[in-house]
């Protein structure tokens, strides 16, 4: 899952909401790796936060081989 917002601060706030949701799951999903801006669960799922971009579409490219 990619969480985007116009700014990094807003992306971080959305990520906190995702984290709060995951903490309430039962049974809880084990976390493999966690930073302030990303998370990898034991099932291989990832959550990554990104700020928006100044391009018209407001999206930032993400993934292997993405041209910037």
Image (cartoon, grey):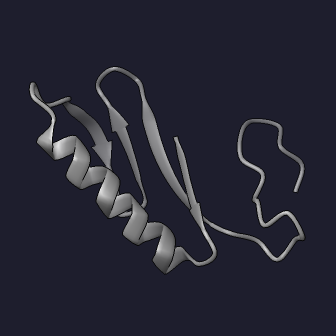
The image shows a total of numbered marks equal to 0
Q: Position of residue 2 (x, y in %)?
A: 56, 47
Q: Quadrant of residue 60?
A: bottom right
Which residue is found at the position 42% from the left and 69% from the top?
12
Which residue is found at the position 68% from the left and 69% from the top?
52
Q: Answer left or right for 52 relative to 61.
A: left
Q: Answer left or right for 41 relative to 67.
A: left
Q: Position of residue 27 (x, y in %)?
A: 9, 25
- Residue found at the very far top of the displayed protein: 43
Q: Check the image and report above or below for 8 versus 42.
A: below
Q: Quadrant of the C terminus?
A: bottom right
Q: Check the image and report above or below for 45 versus 49.
A: above
Q: Answer left or right for 66 relative to 1.
A: right
Q: Check the image and report above or below for 36 versus 47.
A: below
Which residue is found at the position 33% from the left and 51% from the top?
18
Q: Answer left or right for 44 relative to 41.
A: right
Which residue is found at the position 15% from the left and 34% from the top?
25
Q: Position of residue 26 (x, y in %)?
A: 9, 28
Q: Position of residue 59 (x, y in %)?
A: 76, 60
């Amino acid at each position: 899952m990619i969480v985007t917002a116009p700014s990094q601060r807003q992306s971080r706030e959305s990520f906190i909401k995702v984290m709060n949701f995951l903490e309430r799951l039962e049974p809880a999903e084990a976390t493999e790796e966690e930073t302030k801006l990303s998370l990898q669960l034991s099932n291989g799922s990832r959550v990554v936060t990104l700020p928006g971009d100044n391009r018209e579409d407001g999206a930032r490219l993400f993934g292997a081989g993405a041209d910037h």
